[in-house]
Image (cartoon, helix red, strand yellow):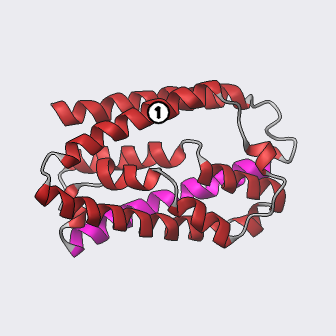
Amino acid sequence: MFSAAATGLFIAGIAVVLAMPGPTNTLLAAAGLRQGFKRSARLTGAELAGYLVSITAWGRFLGEAAQVLPWLPGVVRVASSLYIAWLAWRMWRAATAVPSAARQLIGMRTLFVATLLNPKGILFASAIFPAPAFQSLPAYLAAMGIFTLLLVPIGLMWVLFGAALGGEKLKWIDPAKMQRGASIVLGLFSVTLAWSVFR
């Protein structure tokens, strides 16, 4: 259905973007910190639902718009790569927001809405998901299956990370260094994404 190279790039893109800090992951980690792993693990279901709605809506819209404006997907990919570069720069400069976000209780609705409005949705739809995923049902189901298989463990890892921050196990971790390391990975992904438009 997808070539091996396209599938590899797709998996790598999903993993990098899902793993990077952002509003949804901050909420997942904060929930783990405040409510514990067992009570917060179910929030990955709300994350998945939010992304499914967002990616599907953006993917269908961009697919239809591209028939009238064939240059639109390339422009959106370049814009997405610039957004990722900006996000990488912002991550480099910003301190982690997990401790401050942990003061509020996080429920399914909160996480669903935060994910639905997360800019990563349009990034997935416009630049990471293969175009055929929005043109045929089998390709869509295959792409969403891969996405789901990656989202659940990555989301659970963010919850576990937050829960571990509340204990003594991760006191040695420097959140600023972790965030800067993630920003470097994000910056490299931005370059790769921009290169794919012009190659």
Pointer 1 local density, CA inside 10 Å: few below 14, some 14–19, many at least 20: many
In the rendering, at what x and y percent does residue 195 appear? 24, 30
Side (left or right) of 87 relative to 94: left
The quadrant the N terminus occupies is bottom left
Based on the picture, tell me whether residue 170 belongs to the magenta stretch.
no
In the rendering, at what x and y percent does residue 70 appear? 12, 50
Q: Nearer the viewer, residue 8 or 197?
A: 197
Q: Is residue 44 visible?
A: no
Q: Is residue 150 above or below residue 171?
A: below
In the rendering, at what x and y percent does residue 82 appear? 38, 33
Q: Which quarter of the figure has residue 35?
A: bottom right
Name the chief secondary structure element in magenta. helix
Q: Residue at the right extreme?
A: 168
Q: Which quarter of the figure has residue 65?
A: bottom left
Residue behind mark 1: 186
Q: Is residue 172 above or below residue 139?
A: above
For the point 75% across and 61% down, the residue is 37
Side (left or right) of 175 relative to 127: right
State which region is magenta: 137-164
Q: Nearer the viewer, residue 81 or 46?
A: 81
Q: How many marks?
A: 1
For the point 50% across and 49% down, the residue is 18
The quadrant the C terminus occupies is top left
Q: Nearer the viewer, residue 102 or 165?
A: 102
Q: Residue at the front extreme?
A: 68
Q: Is residue 3 above or below residue 115?
A: above
Side (left or right) of 117 relative to 73: right
Q: Nearer the viewer, residue 86 or 32?
A: 86
In the rendering, at what x and y percent does residue 99 appear? 80, 43
Q: Amino acid at mark 1?
A: Leu
